[in-house]
Image (cartoon, rainbow, N blue to C red):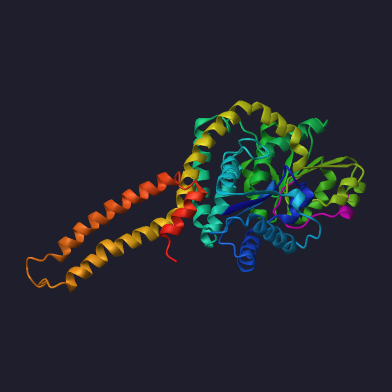
């Protein structure tokens, strides 16, 4: 069986999602934990600003889906020391068809907050590469992820789902446009990951020019600022810089908040202007207490849904088209997974036929009264002829088995076939 536990922006607020953000060290530690305590045989974790998703695989555990889901959720809660019930904030899916449908939609940009955005593809590839590198994937998950990437590529090539698609960074800049009344605001961008770079470029395209950049690695900030004809400031000075800033965009990979409510309160007291903060980080860079400080307005990724809804309406016709293509890829993958259920019986069947048709025949010929040393006896020729008989007979029988079980979809037929052909 395969399954999915998803904690995403549709069902869980950012305050909860940030508690369950997994970096690569967490992914490896949690994989080892599940392997030891639950017996998981395949695992891939995707963790972004909008979701943490756990894709898992167990062989031969049909009928135990609820028990296994419960065990993984329990381990997840304990791993993050989360005492409340996590289930109301989770989407739980089992079965290769349903899990692959979600993953195919995800890789195509249909499950993203910003429909059609491409960043999820890179995030999925990174998650897959990490799982592959650390030997975490089972055979079904491996095939499923590869097929999902193939699906996403086909849909982006054959629809306009990503044409003019906006990103979270773009949505943030649009939100800033709606909220600010200042003609030439002063910006400070903290962090220089991909999301931050995109935000700066979108600001530039909107003809905002008073933009300062800071990053823990100052050389990186200087290099990027120079390429955009902007100014870089040292990371240690960014809190002082906020006193002369109208709009600050935080987008760092820090696990912990990088500024406290006391610090922001002092900054506001020393400033003669209101401050708009856009926090695009998950976990958030700005603590919840900061949202109550007078004169400071804070926007996080969950506050961009009005832009998201507009994006959805624009792409509605492309979504329908993409879903039709996904159905075709799902059918192909479903055929593969169903036929895979027949694999143990088929391997056992071929083994038994080989032993009877070839091995026993050769042994009987050799043990008979014939003179095997006679030059007329050609053991290699006999072996070739027997192999042809074996291939013909087994291929015909396997074809009949697939027909009888509807290519592995009929579980009753599979049960009977396994009883007949599987070795005890």
User: x, y percentage for residue 156?
Assistant: 53, 35
Residue in the foreground of this view, choosing between 88 and 254: 88
What type of secondary structure mainly makes up the magenta span? loop
Residue in the foreground of this view, choosing between 166 and 352: 352
User: x, y percentage for residue 386?
Assistant: 22, 59
Quadrant of the frame with the N terminus:
bottom right
Chain part drawn in magenta = 250-264
Instruction: Name which quarter of the figure residue 347 lies in.
Output: bottom left
Instruction: Name which quarter of the figure residue 218 lies in.
Output: bottom right
Identify which residue is drawn at 47% across, 48% down.
Answer: 408
Q: Is residue 94 visible?
A: yes
User: x, y percentage for residue 229?
Assistant: 65, 40
Identify which residue is drawn at 16% across, 72% down.
Answer: 368
Identify which residue is drawn at 40% across, 49% down.
Answer: 401
Q: Is residue 208 visible?
A: no
Quadrant of the frame with the C terminus:
bottom left
Residue in the foreground of this view, choosing between 388 and 364: 364
Magenta stretch encompasses residue 422: no
Location of residue 160 with respect to 125 vertically, above or below: above
């Amino acid at each position: 069986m395969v399954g999915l536990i998803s904690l995403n922006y549709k069902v869980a607020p950012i305050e909860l999602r940030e508690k369950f953000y997994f970096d690569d060290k967490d992914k490896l530690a949690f994989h080892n934990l599940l392997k030891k305590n639950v017996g998981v045989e395949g695992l891939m974790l995707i963790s972004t600003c909008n979701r943490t998703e756990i894709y898992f695989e167990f062989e031969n555990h049909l009928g135990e889906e609820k028990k296994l889901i419960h065990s993984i959720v329990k381990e997840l809660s304990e791993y993050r020391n989360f005492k409340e019930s996590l289930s109301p904030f989770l989407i739980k899916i089992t079965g290769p068809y349903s899990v692959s449908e979600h993953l195919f939609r995800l890789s195509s940009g249909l499950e993203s907050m910003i429909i059609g955005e491409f960043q999820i593809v890179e995030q999925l590839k990174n998650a897959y590469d990490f799982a592959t590198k650390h030997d975490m994937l089972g055979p079904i998950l491996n095939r499923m992820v590869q097929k999902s990437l193939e699906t996403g590529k086909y849909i982006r090539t054959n629809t306009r789902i990503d044409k003019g698609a906006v990103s979270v960074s773009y949505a943030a800049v649009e939100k800033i446009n709606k909220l600010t009344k200042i003609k030439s605001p002063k910006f400070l961008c903290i962090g220089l990951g991909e999301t931050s770079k995109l935000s700066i470029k979108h600001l530039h395209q909107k003809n905002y020019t008073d933009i300062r950049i800071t990053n823990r690695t100052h050389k990186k900030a200087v290099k990027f600022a120079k390429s955009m004809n902007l100014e870089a400031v040292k990371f240690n000075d960014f809190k002082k810089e906020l006193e002369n800033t109208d709009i600050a965009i935080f987008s760092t990979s820090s696990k912990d908040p990088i500024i406290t409510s006391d610090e922001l309160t002092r900054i506001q007291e020393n400033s003669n202007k209101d401050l708009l903060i856009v926090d695009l980080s998950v976990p958030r860079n700005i603590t919840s207490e900061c949202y109550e400080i007078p004169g400071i307005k804070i926007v996080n990724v969950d506050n961009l849904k009005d832009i998201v809804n507009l994006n959805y309406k624009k792409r509605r016709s492309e979504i329908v088209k993409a879903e039709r293509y996904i159905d075709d890829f799902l059918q192909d993958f479903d055929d593969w997974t169903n036929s895979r259920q027949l694999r143990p019986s088929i391997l056992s069947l071929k083994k038994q036929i080989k032993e009877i048709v070839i091995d026993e025949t050769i042994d009987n010929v050799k043990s008979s009264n014939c003179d095997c040393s006679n030059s007329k006896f050609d053991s290699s020729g006999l072996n070739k002829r027997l192999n042809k008989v074996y291939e013909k007979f087994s291929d015909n029988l396997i074809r009949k088995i697939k027909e009888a079980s509807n290519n592995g979809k009929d579980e009753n037929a599979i049960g009977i076939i396994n009883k007949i052909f599987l070795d005890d």
